[in-house]
Amino acid sequence: AVVSTQSTGTIDYTRSRARFVFIMPSQDADLAKGKKLFVQRCAQCHYVEANHPHKTGPNLHGLFGRKTGQQPGFDYTAANKNKNIVWGEETLFEYLKDPKKYIPGTKMIFAGLKKEKERIDLIAYLKEATK
């Protein structure tokens, strides 16, 4: 099934690969690689499943379509609360490249993913895992 995203692209979830048309038309997102990246780089600070507590970082369940700094029960910095953007594929693509540059003052210590393909894979995984 092909589903519309909140941005201008579509994602095809009929296979284990998703197409991110809005970011890089020639890039296929690999959900398995995205999950592996999440486990290696993100899971120590974040859950993606519903009904799990926050860790060092907020639980990411329901991330897409939510404004920055708005997950109930997590103590965000003023920088995150005041950024006032909505999380989607495009905002995450920029944020995950360099979180401290995108939101100066964030307490997230993650250095970022410089490789575009890694960000595309991770975002595809997050899109599915945080529903």
Image (tube, rainbow, N blue to C red):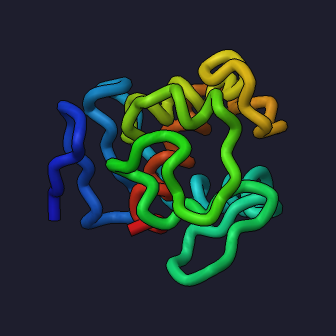
**Viewer-side residue, 75 vs 128:** 75
Q: Name the residue nearer the viewer: 28 or 58.
A: 58
| Position of residue 43 in the picture relative to residue 9 (left or right) | right
In the image as oriented, which residue stretches furthest toward the bottom?
Answer: 51
Residue 24 place in picture, x, y as percent = 36, 24
On the image, the x and y values in percent for residue 31 come to 49, 58
Residue at (63% x, 23% y) in the render: 103
The front one of 51 and 12 is 51
Side of 49 where 115 appears, left or right: right
Residue at 41%, 64% in the rendered image: 128
Of residues 98 and 26, the one drawn nearer to the viewer in this rendering: 98
* Label total for image: 0
Residue at 49% x, 56% y is 126
At a point 17% along the width and 56% down the height, the residue shown is 3
Residue 49, above or below 31: below
Image position of 23 (left or right of 96):
left
Instruction: Specify the quadrant of the image occupied by residue 34.
Output: bottom right
38 relative to 72 in the view: left or right = right
Q: Is residue 114 above or below residue 72?
A: above
x and y, in percent, of residue 40 in the image = 79, 57
- Please state, as top left, top right, bottom left or bottom right, where the C terminus lies in the image: bottom left
When the figure is inspected, residue 37 is found, relative to residue 112, above or below; the finding is below
Name the spot of residue 95 as percent of width and height, x first. Answer: 57, 28
- Res 111 → quadrant: top right
Q: Quadrant of the N terminus?
A: bottom left
